[in-house]
Image (tube, helix red, strand yellow):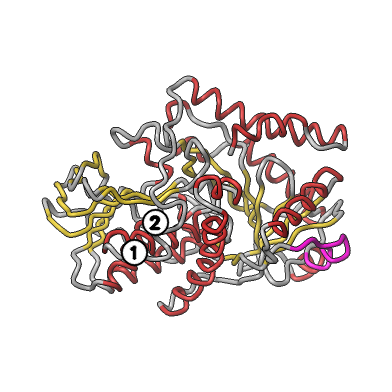
Amino acid sequence: MTPPSLWHETAGAWTPRPPLPGDVSCDVAIVGAGFTGLWTAYYLALARPDLRIVVLEAKTAGFGASGRNGGWCSALFPASLDTLAAMSSRSAALAQHAAMRASVDEVVSVATAEGIGADIAKGGTIVLARSAAQLARARAEVESAAGWGLDGLILLSREEALARVRASGVLGATYTPDCAALHPAKLVRGLATAVERYGVALHELTRVTAIEPHRVSTAHGIVTADVVVRATEGYTAALPGFGRALAPVYSLIVATAPLSGSLWAEIGLERRETFSDHRHLIVYGQRTADDRLVFGGRGAPYPFRSRVDPRHERDERVFARLREAVVDLFPALTGVAFTHAWGGALGVPRDWCASVGLDPENGLAWAGGYVGDGVSTTNLAGRTLRDLILGIPSELTALPWVGHRSPAWEPEPLRWLGVNAGLRAMTLADTEERLTGRPSLIARAVSPLLG
């Protein structure tokens, strides 16, 4: 079978673990062996080695977004500081931001402690401004951060930006040190091995058909538990009762063959900085440890009725646009071979705000809705769920995203029409700015609807 991504292909051999052998009971049942489920199992097992923890995975650990993403471990949180402050307070919003920054270092620290070779390089993130409108947004972001009393985001001049990444048309950039580039499949598989070492039962090839209070149903048996954790992100809509909880939106990625040293001298990224630019339709990239350039972005259509299907992971028109976009950024890539292309579904809540929580009355816990910012946010979720499940009040359980309930998405066909109209609007906004040279009126009109 063809590996679902470059990351899976280059993460080493992997033999699926046996499925659930039959009915079992435990203290904590976790549905999903991506980053959310595995971080939760990891921190629970360390805190309470006596807990009986069972993780259930439909495919293999990291099969979904955890093994397919762009490899950014960043301090980005999908909801803005203003949104978080409106939900709670200014100080709580700042605490969430501080927790996200700390989560980047926590991921790096655990990978080192557990001997997980995930090709990690904390070079930060540079977001380029390649038009006057983009430069205005860059300046506004830095001014907003300063208004919150934050100093982790700085504005780079054209010369300072080009010293880091030698892209075309650069007028300036923003830079933050709070991001590490990594190999996500190596990290998630190493984490799966670690949780087993600490006594967690991990059953792959076990599709969950229903989640209920204290009960998880599968084709292989029933798991009863004091607490059931839903950690299914982009696959959540397939579960009965959760069809409108998270919309699966596809992000697609292309990757080059390993590039020569002379090519990298023309491109930059010597510290393996992750990179993007200030366009409206999100793009993201990194230089891998084996010197490939990986570049991804949004733009794939949202599937009707939130269907997650392997056919949606490949859209040749989107792949072509991504290759064109990255060559436009780096003309030195003209004629270079692109060897891999893949995609995956990420989970988007209706208000674009990730959440984590536990209902003590029915024992149902959850975390998700990361909108593509999950590599570090999942780690924060795992530590928070540990405290919630163990009943330990902490700084983490007081963060504003804890217990947040996003509204349900609209029923179809309104959901399909709305999400795809939003994606199309962002594409049109970028076109508008190229033609007018001014900030997009389309983006201003649509942005309140897109979180």
Closer mark to the observer between disc 1 and disc 2: 1
Badge 1, how many Cα within 10 Å: few under 14, some, many 20+?
few
Total marks drawn? 2
Secondary structure under the numbered disc 2 in the rendered image: helix
Q: Are marks 1 and 2 in contact (CB under 8 Å)?
A: no
- Give the amino acid type for the residue marked by disc 2 in the picture: Thr
The quarter in which the C terminus is drawn is top right
Q: Which is more toward the observer, 5 or 281?
A: 281
Q: Residue at x 73, y 52 (%)?
A: 141
Residue 446 rendering spot, x and y as whole percentages: 66, 30
Place residue 287 in its image quadrant: bottom right
Residue 391 rendering spot, x and y as whole percentages: 27, 62
Q: Which residue is labeled 1 in the image?
A: 393
Q: Residue at x 63, y 38 (%)?
A: 318
In the image, the segment drawn in magenta is 154-164
Q: Which is more toward the observer, 241 or 6?
A: 241
Residue 394 rendering spot, x and y as whole percentages: 38, 66
From where the camera sits, is residue 72 visible?
no
Q: Which residue is labeled 2 in the image?
A: 36
Examine the structure image and report whether residue 155 is included in the region drawn in magenta.
yes
Examine the structure image and report whether residue 84 is included in the region drawn in magenta.
no
Marks 1 and 2, the one that precedes in the sequence: 2
Residue 235 rendering spot, x and y as whole percentages: 39, 41
Q: Residue at x 28, y 74 (%)?
A: 197
Residue 430 is left or right of residue 44, and the answer is: right
Q: Main secondary structure of the magenta part?
A: helix
Residue 312's place in the image compared with 70, above or below, is above
- Give the amino acid type for the residue marked by disc 1 in the picture: Pro
Q: Residue at x 19, y 53 (%)?
A: 20
From where the camera sits, is residue 5 visible?
yes
Residue 245's place in the image compared with 48, above or below, is above
